Image (tube, grey):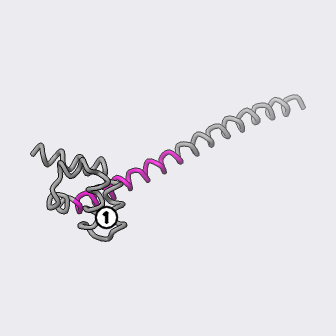
Amino acid sequence: MTNNINTFQFMLENRKVIIEKINENGSVPKAWDQLRKKLPEGVKIIKYNTFKGYVKSLNVINNILNEKDEFLRTMQKLSEEVEKIRQEKNELEIKLVRLGKIIRRI
């Protein structure tokens, strides 16, 4: 079990490189050959058949993590917009108070 965890953990940590090579090559065997050169430490932990079996799971997890990253970017943008709107609201409140003081003098 620990070996499987280490194998999949390695694939998760290197998911972007692995997915990129699979997409570039259009096949798992060709990607495997390139990854053996690019990630030689992976060959020590992962056998080809294990790699091939985990690729579908890695793709699903990669898609989920990409959606999560997109969600977090959207949340960050919204948070920045909310902060900007708060600042504008505070500025408008200050202007409203000043205007109220001017009107009272008239």
Q: How many marks?
A: 1
Question: In which image quadrant can residue 23 be found?
Answer: bottom left
Residue furthest to the right in view is 106
Residue furthest to the left in view is 1
Say which residue appears at 71% left-offset and 36% top-offset: 91
Residue 27 relative to residue 96: left or right: left
- Confirm whether the magenta stretch covers residue 73: yes
Residues shaded magenta: 55-77
Question: In which image quadrant can residue 52 be found?
Answer: bottom left
Question: In which image quadrant can residue 89 be found?
Answer: top right
Say which residue appears at 23% left-offset and 59% top-offset: 57
The secondary structure making up most of the magenta span is: helix
- Residue 25 x, y percent position in the rendering: 33, 68
Question: Which of 73 and 37 lies nearest the eye of the viewer?
Answer: 37
Residue 67 relative to residue 101: left or right: left
Q: Amino acid at mark 1?
A: Ile
Residue furthest to the bottom in view is 26
Q: Is residue 11 above or below residue 80?
A: below
- Residue 15 x, y percent position in the rendering: 31, 53
Say which residue appears at 61% left-offset and 39% top-offset: 86
Question: Which of 92 and 50 lies nearest the eye of the viewer?
Answer: 50
Say which residue appears at 52% left-offset and 43% top-offset: 79
Question: Which of 80 and 63 lies nearest the eye of the viewer?
Answer: 63
- Residue 16 x, y percent position in the rendering: 35, 54
Q: Is residue 15 above or below residue 94?
A: below
Question: Looking at the rendering, in which quadrant would you find the C terminus?
Answer: top right
Query: In the rendered image, which residue does mark 1 sit on?
Result: 22
Q: How many residues crowd mark 1 within 10 Å: few (<14), some (14–19), many (20+)?
A: some
